[in-house]
Image: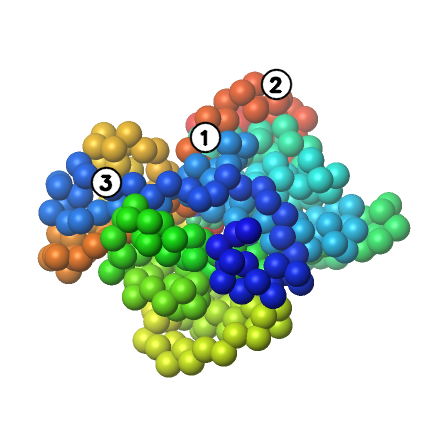
Amino acid sequence: MIPLFDTYPQMAEKCPYVPLAELPTPVQPLSRLGEALGINLFIKRDDLASSRYGGNKVRKLEFILAEAQRRGVRTIITFGRAGTNHGVATAVFATPLNIHTICLVLPQPNTAAVRQNLLLMLAHGAELHQFRSKNRLVVGAVWQAGKRTAVDRRPPFILEAGGSTPLGTLGYVNAAFELRQQIEAGECPEPDLIYVAAGTLGTAVGLMLGCQLAGLKSRIVPVRVVETEYASPRLMARLFHKTHRVIHSFAPVIHNFHRFEEKFDLREGFFGGGYGVYTQGGETAVQQMQQLEGISLEGTYTGKTLAALIADAHNGQLAGKTVLFWNTYNSRPLADQIAHADYHHLHPAFHPYFATS
Ligand SMILES: Cc1ncc(COP(=O)(O)O)c(C=O)c1O
């Protein structure tokens, strides 16, 4: 049983869940980076969450795809930017369950990671469409939903960007319970602070709710790496309460969340020039992690998050604290999966990503 269901056995009977990840993910000391920063530093290796595709999406999909299977859907329509990790994960894990993935995306700055993800989605059978604006994307979604309803003879499953629905967020509530088990087993001391990237918020909010339910004192530091229209204290609070209601519907848990209000703040100042636009601090953080610990991060999410942690360490704010960096980026090698993927098979709207580097 997963740690969340161990604690709330009633949930196991009612809550949709399909095991996809290889859990628990390791928690390890980052001795060299910690020493360089003068802090007691650990890492939670969700980058190893699955040998098919690591990162933070697989925990969310364990709940989301179980619900999709329960509804008997044949297609998932989901959203993101061109290089969406969530789109990749959905295609990687939904296709073997005979669920077709359609990913509707907005453009983003071109990087090697974007090109790799486009090829991964292609290799895993996803259908991709790019739109120039959010309004056009909404129209496209309505059109695709109608088309798939006719083809599948049932409506598709509409999945929000990043998989940050209340059900998906349960993946990170469960992750907090998993961390508690690791703390109890002596694998790491109880962190004072947990630094995590905040995009569509499911990861950070799930950890916040999970830590409170699990009785951990750890405070989550969600580092904003997307525009404020997608990540704000108001949206965090909303997702937190909705997720709590979902848990409550499966297992009536009485809890007094008197610490709520103080918790809904995002760490600002590390977003930089835009979504997917690398910052100097982020690039330095990625290099330091690679050189000192041999772990690969990227510049859109995890580099900016580590940059915040490093800045706080330099300011002396982390002195005497135990700090956990939650790695949300895949580190499994993926080259084999795209060895035969040819970008010419993508819609021509995506070809410019491959014309420049
Ligand atoms: C590598 C990586 N880290 C962090 C995040 C942010 O997680 P969330 O969307 O749950 O806030 C994402 C996705 O958006 C991601 O792809």
Label 3, label 1: how far apart the Cα atoms are = 19 Å
Residue 173, horizontal then vertical, whole percent: 47, 60
Q: Which residue is mark 1?
A: 332
Q: Residue at x 57, y 39 (%)?
A: 88
What residue is drawn where x is 46% and y is 34%?
Answer: 113
101 or 247: nearer the viewer: 247
- Kindly indicate the quadrant of the structure image that contains residue 265: bottom left
Q: Which residue is mark 3?
A: 30
Label 1 amino acid? Arg
Q: Spatial distance from mark 2 to mark 1, Cα to Cα? A: 18 Å
Q: Decide if ligand 1 comes within 8 Å of the CB at mark 2.
A: no
Q: Is mark 3 within 8 Å of ligand 1?
A: no
Quadrant of the drawing holding the C terminus: top left
Q: Is residue 100 visible?
A: no
Coordinates of residue 34 in the picture (x, y in percent)? 17, 43
Image quarter for residue 227?
bottom left
Q: Is residue 24 left or right of residue 147?
A: left
Q: Relative to 64, is 279 above or below?
A: above
Camera-nearest label, 3 or 1: 3
Name the residue tied to disc 2. Answer: 340
Q: Circles 2 and 1: CB distance less than 8 Å?
A: no
- Under tag 2, what secondary structure? loop
